[in-house]
Image (cartoon, rainbow, N blue to C red):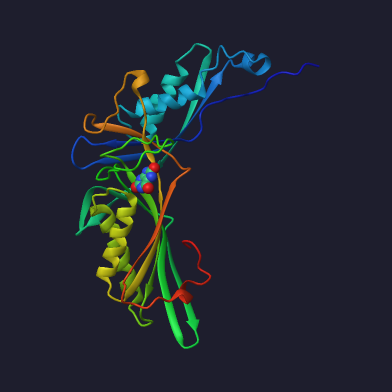
Amino acid sequence: MAIVLGPNQYGKAEVRVVAVDRSSPRHELVDLNVSTSLRGDFAAAHTRGDNAHVLTTDAQKNTVFAFARDGVGSPEAFGLRLARHLAASYDWITGARVAVESYGWERIAVGGRPHDHAFRRPGGEVRTAVVTADGDDLHVLAGLADLVVLKTTGSEFWGFPRDRYTTLAETRDRVLATAVTARWRYASADQDWDHDFSTVRATLLETFAATHSLALQQTLYAMGEAVLEAVPEVAEVRMSMPNRHHFLQDLSAYGLSNTPGEDETLVYHADDRPYGLIEGTVLRDDVPPAEVAWLGTPGSR
Ligand SMILES: O=c1[nH]c(=O)c2[nH]c(=O)[nH]c2[nH]1
């Protein structure tokens, strides 16, 4: 009896690559989750820890980002380019599997017109309502959760203090992305609920798109302020907005630049965690508070 190595493959799973084509003011956005696997003769790595045949999963990840820099196109075409390249990279590599998930985004409409660089990711959004009867008083909180939005430009972040642990570079042009969770309290229990919900939702989307952002905090406040202006019966808005960071991928090690203002296609790495979490309330100062309306409704949901 001999113990032998059976079928095996290895690669980098779930490379979150976002490519933005900025060759015209109307940006195009491709958002992918790419997983690569290599097949071939990797026996020595398994049986002896000899890595001479191991094209690192790190290099496979870098290849995904580098290839995105030339434009992505359809997921099938991108997968073909990658799979062909990876399978041909060394003679002991006999095959490659590339799985691509592509997340769809649609343009946010502002004033009825699709915006050039603000997008919404459809699906997963939830409408919420919490009604409280407190003696004779009725309180209504309407809301929404997981309204996923992204701007490919029109967002800056700079001017923050630099303590000894601050390493973040200032930026005048970044991707801004978040999943909006918001609840708003009506000062009345007799509203056209569906109409008001639509107004608030559209206002949140339009304000996210149209606000030139210097911080997600500023965008949050602007969105709340716009809701209060749009619907007079809304007394307060509470929002929770994770900052879904998109970091420009450093491609300089393989001779590629990736610089806002210089390159037509920019390639980002979409990080899922940790994330900044920006939360706040925007309210009218002439409406009495109603904490009982929020009792048992902690956080965002
Ligand atoms: O909009 C932002 N607000 C912050 O508080 C913050 N902190 C950070 O690292 N990036 C950002 N972005």
Residue that sits furthest to the right in the current view? 1
The one nearer the camera, 225 or 195, is 225
Q: Within the displayed image, which quadrant is ligand 1 positioned in?
A: top left
Q: Residue 27: give x, y in percent of width and height.
A: 24, 41
Q: Residue 215: give x, y in percent of width and height.
A: 31, 49
The one nearer the camera, 23 or 179, is 179
Residue that sits furthest to the front in the current view? 163
Q: Residue 13: give x, y in percent of width and height.
A: 51, 33
Q: Residue at x 62, y 16 (%)?
A: 45
Q: Is residue 104 visible?
A: no
Q: Residue at x 44, y 36 (%)?
A: 165
Q: Residue at x 45, y 20 (%)?
A: 86
Name the side, left or right, on which 189 lies relative to 11. left
Note whether 270 is above or below 227 in the view shown. Answer: above
Q: Is residue 257 visible?
A: yes
Q: Count how many numbered circles sit on residues in the image.
A: 0
Q: Residue 12: give x, y in percent of width and height.
A: 51, 29
Q: Quadrant of residue 48?
A: top right
Q: Quadrant of residue 220?
A: bottom left
Q: Residue at x 62, y 13 (%)?
A: 50
Name the side, left or right, on which 6 lies relative to 270. right
Note whether 206 is above or below 51 in the view shown. Answer: below
Note whether 49 is above or below 29 in the view shown. Answer: above
Image quadrant occupied by the N terminus: top right
Q: Quadrant of residue 231?
A: bottom left
Name the side, left or right, on which 134 lies relative to 23. right
